[in-house]
Image: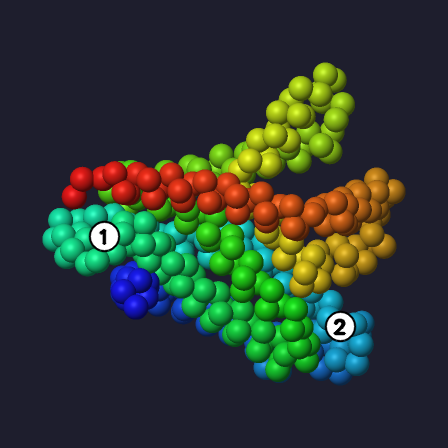
Amino acid sequence: MQLLAIVIDSFRDAKDRKIFWIMIIISVMIATSMACVGFNDQGVDVLFGTWTHATPEWSAGSEELAANVAAVAIEVIADNYLGWIGMVMALVATAAVFPSLMEHGHIDITASKPLARWQLFLGRYLGGMVFMLVQAVVFVGLTFLVMGVRWGCWTWSYFWLVPLIVLMFSYLFAFSALFGVWTRRSMTSLMLTMMAWFVLFSVQSTHALLEANPEWDKTGVWRRTAAGLHWVVPKTQDITVIAGKLVGAKSIVEVIPLEEAAETEREREEFRHAVEGQRNLVAELNPGASIGSSLAAELAIILLAVRLFSRRDF
């Protein structure tokens, strides 16, 4: 029960910050913007019929319309909310979870409870995760209802985004917890976490580029080094690919026949290459291996943070 009280206290600490409600408002705004677009017998209608764009192939009578529109919307949502917008805001909201705990006065009262320090750390950590879970449920729930009610596409697999959003956040929150315990400063912790995220992005991007262009590394040394680093760090970029794979998202070039609109053979080849590259990326990724190795790296970071927290003098 005491551990649960620490979790609730940590969640309330994050919720009391204005950014919690700002994130809720943004979720409502995104859902409202999606609801402003619909489809009738003529084509696409905007602002609930205020303006209609006559596009027969995008009319309500098209059987694949809703599925294609929802698939593209999911791709955009996954890339942006999972990719950076939602994550950055959540990190800002939870950056003070550990520094505020270690302030004089607060830590004296909390540490006096009959709890081991690792339990205290775990309670605060889980509180931050609950914060992200609430945001994910609100965001996914609202956008799911819009796609179902407004577009007639009830994509139940869309709810895979909830655990994936929380999982993505957990990768970064582990760094935030470590830096928060180490520096005891919210802003410093946030900046160091953003730097760590950039390093993760660089490692994953370098690995992807070398795998796609093996001719760049004749000896193979850099490819093996990049592959090794790739598998020992949390793989944040894989989450958006896994989301698309589980939910059935599609990129715009897969839905709209842009290849037919190309004026030259070179442009058509570029479109075909983009679609093929996206399909290969999804097909080659092993979700189990990616998530498993990332969770192992996250656990190592958390254990380091717990050790540092346990050895701190308060």
At label 2, the amino acid type is Leu
Q: Of discs 2 and 1, which sits in the foreground?
A: 1
Q: Residue 83 placed where, x, y %?
A: 54, 51
- Considering every residue shown, the one lying at the far right of the view is 265
Task: Name the residue: 69% across, 47% down.
Answer: 286
Q: Residues within 10 Å of mark 2 (few under 14, many from 20)?
A: some
Question: 139 or 133: nearer the eye?
Answer: 133
The tag on residue 65 is 2
Instruction: Kindly identify which residue carries mark 1.
Output: 101
Q: In this view of the protein, can residue 61 be seen by the observer?
A: yes
Give the position of the C terminus as an image quadrant: top left
Task: Name the residue: 57% across, 78% down.
Answer: 145
**Where on the picture, by quarter, is residue 1?**
bottom left
At label 1, the amino acid type is Leu
Relative height, residue 55 to residue 80 (above, below): below
Question: 266 or 107: nearer the eye?
Answer: 107
In the image, taking residue 51 as reference, residue 128 lies left or right, namely: left
**Mark positioned earlier in the residue sequence (2 or 1):** 2
Question: 89 or 160: nearer the eye?
Answer: 160
